[in-house]
Amino acid sequence: MNSINLQQASLIADQALERGRALGFAPLTVVVLDAGGQIKVLKREDSSSLLRPEIAIGKAWGVLGMGFGGRELARRAAKMPMFFTALNAMSDGRMVPVPGGVLVRDDSGAIVGAVGISGDVSENDEICAVFGIEAAGLRPDTGDPQPGAA
C-alpha cells in the first residue's frame, strides 16, 4: 500500500496552517492520516477550540473510509440520512460528512492518505487542505470533479 510519508504530511499541515493565517481564517486544527487511517501529523493552532482535533480526524477518517472527498460525502449524507446515521454508529461516531475532509492522491490516482481541517467554515477548511496537499506535490480530491476533468 502506498502511503503518505512523514515529510509530506508535515509539509501539508504546515502549508495548510500558513494558508489559513494568510487568509485571516479562524484558528485551525489539521490532521493528516496515512492510507491505513493512522495519524501522521496533527497540529492544533493556539486558540483552536476544544473539539477541533476530533472534528478534523472525523473529516479525514470519513473520506478515507468511504473513498471519496468530503463534498461527495456531504451530498450522499443529505440524500441518504438513515444510511449515514447507521454508518456513523458502525464507525463509533467517527464520520463527519462535510467539506474539509480531502483525500490525498499520488500521481497515479492512488489514495495515499487524507487531510481533515476544522476551525473555520468547512469551505475555508477545505481551501487550506487543498493548498497544503498541492504544496506537497500531491493531488487533492475534494469529492467534486477536478477542473478540466472529462
Image (cartoon, rainbow, N blue to C red):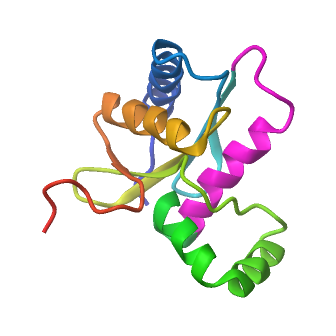
Q: Horizontal and vertical percent for residue 66?
A: 55, 71
Q: Is residue 89 left or right of residue 139?
A: right
In the displayed structure, would residue 2 be above or below residue 116? below
Q: Horizontal and vertical percent for residue 83?
A: 69, 86
Q: Which one is nearer the viewer's eye here, 67 or 101?
A: 101
Q: Residue at x 33, y 28 (%)?
A: 135
Q: Residue at x 38, y 32 (%)?
A: 131
Q: Is residue 32 left or right of residue 19?
A: right
User: Magenta segment, which residues?
Assistant: 45-65
Where on the picture, by quarter, is residue 141? bottom left
In the displayed structure, would residue 41 be above or below residue 17? below
**Is 58 included in the stretch rendered in magenta?**
yes
Q: Quadrant of the C terminus?
A: bottom left
Q: Residue at x 22, y 58 (%)?
A: 108
Magenta region, mostly helix, strand or loop?
helix
Q: Horizontal and vertical percent for residue 146?
A: 25, 56
